[in-house]
Image (cartoon, grey):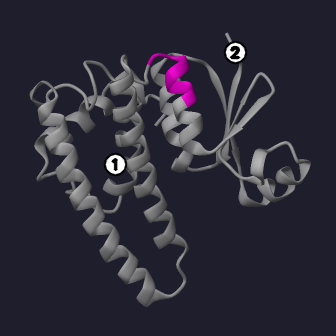
Amino acid sequence: MPKHRVIYFNARGGAEPSRLVLSAAGVDFEDVRFTREEWEIEKRTGKYPFGQLPCLDTDGEMLSQSRAIARYLANEYGLAGKTNLEKAKVDMLNDTFGDLLQGIAKIHFEKDEGKKAELQLEYDKKVATTLAALEKMLIANNGGDGFLVGDGVSLADLAFFAQMECNLSSAADLLDTYPKLKALNARVAGSQHCSMA
């Protein structure tokens, strides 16, 4: 069994889907979390591709880019979809949640309060549009009482859960108008799949 080290800051962020995939697969891994100050020193070592986090160290092989890492782990541990079409749908959803996470980061790091408010309005609209589309997609897959893609949990469900953890922390009623998604989020939260969350 390869030895994995998920390397990120002390936050969920871009590393959380990968942590959840490993947890769902029952794979032991090292969860390395740097402070900003520690990272400034650590990245000078030159061992991190592109000098950014998150990274995955697997037996000395280093991968960068959060979505690429999550896809790799999902493929390794059977959580990427069973057919090429399912894999494409899982990738599509993982990328969608990655875009939402980038939207949160833009808002967080924006210094101008007026611009921050504009970004928040745009983001809220994008979240509403995305959730409406996801609710339809979930219902189209076996009536909405299973998972986003196929007949078992996948990276798509785990990335959805990770994203909702971010969104629900500031808008607890966000999923109230999307009953199937709300039930999915609770199913994933209550399973062993999210023991690392």
Per the image, the residue denoted by label 2 is: 2
Q: In the picture provided, is 109 more to the left or to the right than 162?
A: right
Q: In the picture provided, is 28 more to the left or to the right than 93?
A: right
Residue type at tag 1 = Met
Disc 2, SS = loop
Looking at the picture, does residue 192 appear above or below residue 155? above
> Whole-percent x and y of residue 180?
14, 38
Residue at horizontal 61%, vertical 19%? 28
Q: Are marks 2 and 1 in contact (CB under 8 Å)?
A: no
* Mark pair 2, 1: CA separation: 30 Å
Q: Dividing the picture into quarters, in which one does residue 147 lie?
A: top left
Name the N-terminal-most of marks 2 and 1: 2
**Residue nearest the viewer, comparing 8 with 103:** 103
As drawn, which residue projects farthest toward the right? 45
Q: Is residue 113 magenta?
A: no
Residue at horizontal 33%, vertical 23%? 153
Residue at horizontal 53%, vertical 42%? 67
| Prevailing secondary structure class for the magenta stretch in the rendered image | helix
Q: In the picture provided, is 70 more to the left or to the right than 131?
A: right
Residue type at tag 2 = Pro
Q: Is residue 73 magenta?
A: yes
Residue at horizontal 90%, vertical 48%? 45
> Whole-percent x and y of residue 2?
70, 15
Looking at the picture, does residue 88 appear above or below residue 102? above
Looking at the picture, does residue 72 appear above or below residue 132? above
Query: Which residues are the magenta region?
Result: 72-78
The number of callouts visible is 2
Q: Dividing the picture into quarters, in which one does residue 31 lie?
A: top right
> Whole-percent x and y of residue 195?
45, 28
Q: Which mark is residue 164?
A: 1
**Residue nearest the viewer, comparing 55 with 20:** 55
Disc 1, SS = helix
